[in-house]
Amino acid sequence: MQSLLRAELVDLDLSAESKEGAARALAERMEALGRVADLDGFLADVAAREAQMPTGLEGGIGIPHCRSAHVTTPTLAFGRSTSGIDFGAPDGPADLIFLIAAPAGADDAHLSILSTLARRLMRPDFVAALRAARTPAEAAALVAGEPNPAPPAFEERGSGGGAPGLGKGRGGESPAGQPFRVVAVTSCPTGIAHTYMAAESLQQAAAEAGIELTVETQGSAGFTKLTPETIAAADAAVFAHDVPVRERARFAGKPTVDVGVKAGINRPAELLQEARDKAARGEVSTTPTPVEEAGEPQDGYGAKLRTWLMSGVSYMVPFVAAGGLLIALAFAIGGYEINTAPSVAEHFVWTEAASWAALLFQTGGLAFGFLVPVLAGYIAYGMADRPGLVPGFVGGAVALTINAGFLGGLIAGLIAGGTVLAVQRLKIPTALRGIMPVVVLPLIGSAITAFLMFLVVGKPVASLQQALTDWLSGLSGANAIILGVILGLMMCFDLGGPLNKVAYAFAIGGLATPNEGSLKVMAAVMAAGMVPPLAMALATTVRGRLFSKTERENGKAAWFLGASFISEGAIPFAAADPLRVIPASMVGGAVTGALSMAFECTLRAPHGGIFVIPLIGNPLLYLVAIAAGTATSAGLVILLKGMRKQDETPRQQAGAAEAAPLPEPAQVTVAA
């Protein structure tokens, strides 16, 4: 700790009035000692961390911190303000400010030292000594030497006992007479300070209440997992975290308190009491769904909703692709009148092409019929895991029955998942817990979902679906072209990402109730999605010198990927040069989408690229639309990359001139 905080890094009369000013004043001291290489860059990283979550703590402490590439040495700077500085703490401004700077690649040992400071800041005697320090050297020595007596330190994966007999009553002991046992996990986005502060705060509260607590700190300094035996023996779990708990399924079946990391710091006693109360009521947590475990740190409800919907779409796409392609092949073999053929179970002639076409059409129709139930079922699965599947499928089937279509499936899935989640939060008798996932949750979820879909929301959604279908049927002229432009832009913006998937889901949703308008939409979406990889392939072929060797190799593969309607084939190019590739791709996609709509091209197959061209209405004009968009995107990429090369050439020449060695002095022979 002595190397982290020196007297030169202490300001006992910090005059800054804002958190930005305080960070700058302390960071300037770091820069003066050579511990920060780029002051503005480091402060930008501090501000970005502060934007994630305020770093003010109750008790008058501000602890701004970040990991930054501009930090050369792990460093602490300490400032004491007389007027106080607002760091977002609920009880007012902070007078003790620690700025923690860690290099982007800081080793575990240094981060462990930083976590030690974070834990000390939870001790009242340590904080009081800092406020009473008279010189910078004294404050630095306090941090480095820890002269004040400290309570017993806890292990990051150890148990803290506490005085026996405290907090017993109200669930202080387990039914068997053993101390009430809690396992806890703490984590924060940076993993330096709040992770360990929450752990220390919970440990102190547990000691006061006579609770046996074991903490797993999932910080940047690494962590040691709680043993399965410790988790199994625990009566409850507390999660104080701002990033997803790693391997959360380990705690399934335990009464769980789930809060942000600052709640673990500010009100640990309340959290432990809540854990006791939940254990007394028999509330248990469920296993997290695969979708939840794949989530990003600090996902909000909007991000979760998108993830749930994309879960349903991803499971639905294979049904749509198989069913749609089978139907398209049936039309190619037997003509559009094949949809009136009798059932092949009653009439099938092995030597007639019409019978084979009818077989393909009816099989594709059966596969396509699963579209809405699968969509709803797997949205509910993404929300509530396997107990949501049955209510989701039932809700999707109801949506089909009342002609609510694709929109009805979306809403049914959300209702089913939400219903199961709500029931899981109820107090359940111990005797019923074993049959909850396989009997109770599917039963109650299906009944409530079907009731709401049949009698409450189903009919309005069906009316909306019919209005959308009628609107697509009436698309013509300028309206169709504008829609084509919008869909083209969406397909090419993130190349297989969420926006691309939204446009694609809109198109295949229309195939559930096919009409002239929905078939035009499907054609425009597939054509626009083919443009980015084809354009990159063309650009690398025409002007290969503008691309790296790896990009030229990727360009060869992009021909096939684009022809197969795999937009992701352009991702390597977009990742390497997004400011040029993505706008160029979007312009080409918009051109293709508009032309496809203007040419009134139609498509019954949801996938296939050029391999389903014979199944497309107006196929020659469709190819013209794709070629026009591909040429537009390729031309723009070549133009933009060529401009960049021109800008770089003078700088490169200037740099070469500066770096070139001076000529050797001429050897002169002087005659005697």
Image (cartoon, helix red, strand yellow):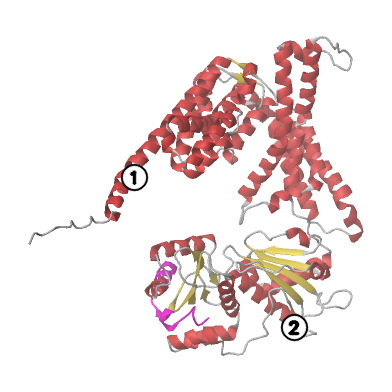
What residue do we see at 47% from left, 23% from top?
628
Which of the two discs, 2 and 1, labels the residue nearer the N terminus? Answer: 2
Q: Relative to residue 464, is residue 545 drawn left or right?
A: left
For label 2, count other residues whose C-alpha is less than 10 Å away and answer few (under 14), some (14-19) or many (20+).
some
What residue do we see at 71% from left, 18% from top?
329
- 453, 435: nearer the viewer: 435
Horizontal and vertical percent position of residue 192: 57, 69
Amino acid carrying mark 1 in the image = Glu
Q: Relative to residue 224, is residue 528 drawn left or right?
A: left
Horizontal and vertical percent position of residue 601: 57, 18
Residue 162's tag is: 2
What residue do we see at 59% from left, 40% from top?
497
Q: Relative to residue 633, is residue 256 drawn left or right?
A: right
Q: Quadrant of residue 672?
A: bottom left
* Furthest-front residue in this view: 672
- 646, 630: nearer the viewer: 646
- Secondary element at tag 1: helix
Horizontal and vertical percent position of residue 560: 59, 29
Q: What stretch is highlighted in magenta?
A: 1-24
Residue marked by disc 1: 648
Mark 2, mark 1: which one is toward the viewer?
1
* Furthest-right residue in this view: 431
What residue do we see at 79% from left, 38% from top?
393
Q: Is residue 188 magenta?
A: no
| Label 2 close to label 1 by CB (< 8 Å) | no
Q: Is residue 162 above or below residue 333?
A: below
